[in-house]
């Protein structure tokens, strides 16, 4: 039996704008059954990498393949519909008066502020997804009255409306208080363990947000891949000290991690 193609395969990707090298020879392969975390300091290239793989930033060199199809050889506008994205930029664009069920339905049509005719099938599917993200009771509540944690779950349901194979969670815990963050992370753990879960990629600065369901880690530094592979191999104090240019201590309790930074003791790397 022929092996399934990688969900995502990036080879020697470089992006230059003028005299600025944004990404340099980035290679990253995400296989079916893996859930990844992308770590890196501000300016490490995380946002640029996401923009490239969603087709909003043109590569200067290298190749990007999604589900076996290569960027440039197919209509990327159609292919990127297989990528669900939950980010603060999407959250900020939602209309205040829109009920949650319509926010979810808008994901099928890739539009903000739903204006197309909504079918019965759309409503049934949206209600199912809201229940799957444990927010069925929010269907008729407007965006303006939802908490930050509820909004993030609704946006995940919205992303799932198009049945993506890859779901990117770009700093989804930003703005959440500690209790709301932990409740949301436990939800992500349950989502990742479900049989129907798409491949997950969590983009974060915080190792505390890496739940046990995440199997692999990509660490970026100054537009390059510093480390990539299984979590147990890549998540080390030495690598994180290099990535964040500070002396850090990594701790593990159960299957969760914590990180502390030594004050005023910069690491020269």
Image (spheres, rainbow, N blue to C red):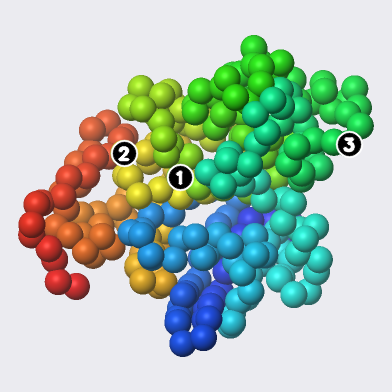
Nearer the observer, 88 or 239? 88
Question: For residue 197, what is the image quadrant?
Answer: top right
User: In front: 137, or 113?
Assistant: 113
Q: Could you tell which of marks 3 and 2 lies nearer the N-terminus?
A: 3
x, y (%) of residue 196?
66, 33
Residue tagged 1:
171
- Viewer-nearest residue: 263 or 257: 263
Q: Secondary structure at mark 1?
A: loop
Residue at point 63%, 26% (across, down)? 143
Neighbours of disc 1 within 10 Å: few (<14), some (14-19), many (20+): some
Q: Nearer the viewer, mark 1 or mark 2?
A: 1
| Residue placed under numbered mark 2 in the picture | 208
Determine the secondary structure under disc 2: helix
Q: Residue at x 74, y 75 (%)?
A: 72
| Residue drawn at x 82%, y 21% as measured from the top left | 124
Question: Would you place residue 55 above or below residue 130 in this image?
Answer: below
Q: CA distance from mark 3 to mark 1?
A: 30 Å
Residue 176 visible (yes or no)? yes
The residue that mark 3 highlights is 116
Alpha carbon distance from label 1 to label 2: 12 Å
Mark 3 and mark 2: Cα distance apart in space? 41 Å
Measured as percent of width and height from the top left, residue 134 is found at: 59, 19
């Amino acid at each position: 039996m022929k092996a399934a193609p990688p969900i995502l395969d990036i080879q020697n990707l470089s992006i230059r704008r003028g005299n600025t090298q944004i990404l340099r020879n980035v290679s990253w392969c995400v296989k079916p059954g893996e859930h990844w975390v992308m770590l890196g300091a501000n300016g490490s290239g995380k946002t640029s990498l996401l923009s490239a793989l969603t087709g909003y930033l043109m590569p200067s060199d290298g190749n990007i393949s999604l589900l076996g199809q290569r960027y440039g050889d197919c209509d990327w506008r159609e292919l990127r519909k297989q990528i669900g994205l939950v980010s603060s930029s999407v959250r900020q664009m939602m209309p205040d008066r829109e009920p949650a069920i319509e926010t979810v339905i808008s994901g099928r049509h890739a539009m903000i502020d739903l204006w197309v005719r909504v079918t019965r099938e759309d409503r049934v599917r949206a209600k199912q997804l809201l229940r799957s993200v444990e927010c069925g009771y929010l269907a008729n509540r407007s965006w303006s009255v939802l908490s930050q944690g509820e909004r993030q779950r609704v946006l995940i349901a919205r992303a799932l409306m198009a049945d993506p194979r890859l779901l990117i969670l770009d700093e989804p815990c930003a703005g959440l208080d500690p209790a709301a963050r932990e409740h949301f992370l436990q939800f992500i753990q349950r989502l990742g363990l479900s049989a129907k879960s798409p491949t997950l990629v969590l983009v974060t600065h915080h190792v505390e947000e890496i739940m046990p369901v995440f199997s692999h880690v990509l660490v970026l530094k100054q537009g390059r891949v510093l480390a990539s592979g299984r979590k147990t191999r890549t998540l080390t104090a030495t690598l994180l000290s290099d990535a964040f240019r500070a002396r850090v201590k990594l701790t593990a309790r159960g299957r969760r991690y914590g990180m502390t930074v030594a004050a005023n003791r910069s690491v020269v790397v």
